[in-house]
Image (spheres, rainbow, N blue to C red):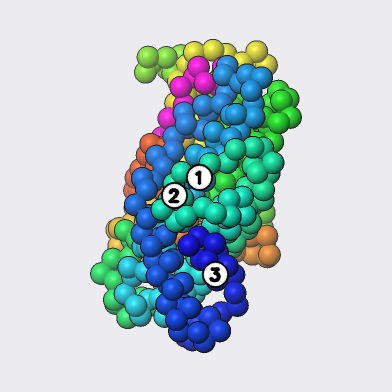
Amino acid sequence: MLRFVNRCVLKPYVRFNSTSVIYNNNTHEDYRLRSALEKITIKLASYPLPQTTLNDLLRFNSKVITKDTDQMILDNANDTLKDMLALTAKRIRELRSLPYICILNANIGTIYDTYLESLQLLLKFISDIDEDIKLESIQDFTIKDTAHNVQFNKTLNQITDLHADNLEILSKGFEEIAHLRVLKDDRDFLDSHLKERILMRLICNHHVALSEQLISNEKSDLIGVVEKNLDVIEIVNRSFEFVNDMCLLKYDEKISMEIDTVILQDDIRIESHNNDHVNSSPIHFPYISSHLQYIITELLKNSARAHIENHVTKPINVTIVANKPYVCNTVGDCHVSNYLEIRIRDLGKGIRPEVFDKIFQYSYTTFVANEGEAYKTLNNSGPNANVISGMGYGMPLSKIYVELFGGDINVQTYLGWGTDVYVKLTGPDMDLVT
């Protein structure tokens, strides 16, 4: 059955204003294909979804790595395969559960097709290795040698590439069907969809990176995609420079920023520093750099726009609070922490109540509405800009990234004065990174 499905799904198909597929106009074959795909989707979507934590990602740390690195690679590969099958099948099931008029939308249909193609790639990988596997035995399939893992990594990279640029498509699709009012609230669907999309990319990238690291057996500050000693201040500076470049392109102006750092022990301040953003002493935190940079960049965009459009010349203030570490890095006066709080404070005159109530809504952007006291994102400028700037996905996505590993984001605004955003993150167990 799996060979049949895999063979059929790779045949050319045509769309007739929907995601329905017609294979060579053969109704019987199409029915068999649909039945087989439905069975696979229902079965795989019933698998438990991965509850990925930073501790899970760091299980193959320097303390447990042995000579049998091949087995570690294979163990992680099989976990990744099961997680990817479950995540992909669930997304297909959830997209099918939308009102049919939603799936008729070309952009949402494209998203559906992307997940269907992702499932096809995973099934093709399985059937290429085990041509005789049966549908009812798919959960028993295992990757048994590193050569197959190389093939698996290529499949994961293909899936990652498929989903690389579909956020804009998703946003356009839901914007186009909004006037139909067929969904009472799209937030629940989009929250779960985007969280699981992030998880898919994270799981794919982590396994590919971890495989390369275990094979090379070289000392590295990375475990998969997790950076054990991520320099938080460097991330803030990098985000600030990016946002300032965007400000220069859009407004022909730049903003300034200052950074304060606070080190706590038993909730008591034991060290504090007031620095400019260039000469700040590093604070290290074990985390995923791309996630933290996305969060900080989105928040700084909002503050930068508020400052420039309200003619505020004072700097944006970034305060970084970390707990005293279990161990200290020997380089400079760095601090390795498993608790991190970042406050971004601007003096951009605050957010009006009617805007504040909508800052975490999807597709809500004061840029499109041309609001002067905007609290969404800067408009994208040039081919390398963030494609969802100005689409109203910046703050909701930031919230998902923060909460992915149990963090929290809180916004406090004072109309006529400014806005504070607090991001609280908890890192992994310190014995996994030291």
Q: Is residue 177 left or right of residue 77?
A: left
Which residue lies at the image location 36% right of the left edge and 59% below the top edge? 42
Q: Which mark is residue 9?
A: 3
Q: Which mark is residue 141?
A: 1
The residue that mark 2 highlights is: 137
Give the secondary structure at mark 3: helix
Which image quadrant for residue 34?
bottom left
Magenta stretch in the rendered image: 421-434
Percent of width and height locating residue 372: 45, 65
Three-letter residue code for mark 1: Phe
Q: Residues within 10 Å of mark 1 (few under 14, many from 20)?
A: some
Q: Residues within 10 Å of mark 2 (few under 14, many from 20)?
A: few
Q: Are marks 1 and 2 in contact (CB under 8 Å)?
A: yes
Give the secondary structure at mark 1: loop
Which residue lies at the image location 47% right of the left edge and 31% below the top edge? 56
Q: Is residue 156 left or right of residue 42?
A: right
Residue in the foreground of this view, choosing between 282 and 374: 282
Looking at marks 2 and 3 on the same chain, the residue that comes earlier in the sequence is marked by: 3
